[in-house]
Image (cartoon, rainbow, N blue to C red):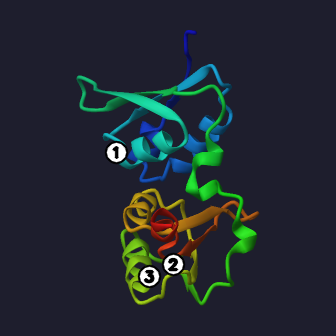
Amino acid sequence: MTTAFVELDVRPILRDGGEPFGKIMEAVAALTPDQGLRLFATFKPTPLLQVLGSKGYSHQVRQLEDGDWEVLFSPTRTEKATEASPAAASDNSAWPDPVQHMDNRELDPPEPMVRILAALESMKRGEVLSAFLCREPTFLLPELAKRGHDWHGGFEPDGKTYKILIRVGAAKAAAAA
């Protein structure tokens, strides 16, 4: 089966100082099982490679002559892999109420990630932290996975606020069982 690629050029957004992650994820969500994404960016989007990898996409990265980057994301399986993404897990009802709440919407990166990771260090296994952010935390998610935390996240109805719930040590506890 040949993959048809939908093209998305986020270079203008990046050059204007914007954050294209939401637009990229919208494009990925609209893909059919036989489609991939051809992404053009001003830098190698390393965190995105991991995020889309967890959603069932392999990648080929190529630096263009002008220094920009082209990435081909191809589906590695026929069904959408949102179920495999920790952010899309469906066991949210079993989580305890958050013991700590943070509003990081007014902070510039990387301060929200630094504050969240520092807060998690002082929490006990199984406790939940809730945080509001002004964008999807693309650099935070791989760090949470490395540290063994589980999370759920998504944009609130206003479309501007990203809410994330993080359960401390949940993934480590599950792996040890």
Image quarter hosting the N terminus: top right
Residue 156, percent across and down? 71, 65
SS class, disc 1: helix
Real-space CA distance between mark 1 and mark 2, rounded to the nearest whole angstrom: 23 Å
Q: Amino acid at mark 1?
A: Thr
Q: Say which of 87 and 21 sits in front.
A: 87
In this rendering, the label closer to the viewer, 3 or 2: 3
* Above/below status of 123 relative to 8: below
Residue 62, percent across and down? 30, 26
Q: On the image, numbered disc 2 is attached to which residue?
A: 104
SS class, disc 3: helix
Say the numbered circle drawn on residue 172.
none
Residue 174, percent across and down? 52, 66
Q: Say which of 44 and 78 sits in front.
A: 78
Assess disc 2: are there few (<14), some (14-19) or many (≥20) residues with their C-alpha within 10 Å of its C-alpha: many
Q: On the image, numbered disc 3 is attached to which residue?
A: 120
Real-space CA distance between mark 3 and mark 1, rounded to the nearest whole angstrom: 24 Å
In the image, taking residue 49 as reference, residue 33 lies left or right, namely right
Q: Say which of 168 and 173 sits in front.
A: 173
The structure residue drawn at horizontal position 49% and vertical position 41%, both measured from the top left corner, is: 52
Q: Amino acid at mark 2?
A: Asn
Assess disc 1: are there few (<14), some (14-19) or many (≥20) residues with their C-alpha within 10 Å of its C-alpha: few
Mark nearer the N terminus (3 vs 1): 1
Mark nearer the N terminus (3 vs 2): 2
The structure residue drawn at horizontal position 38% and vertical position 75%, both measured from the top left corner, is: 111
Q: On the image, numbered disc 1 is attached to which residue?
A: 46
Q: Are marks 3 and 1 in contact (CB under 8 Å)?
A: no
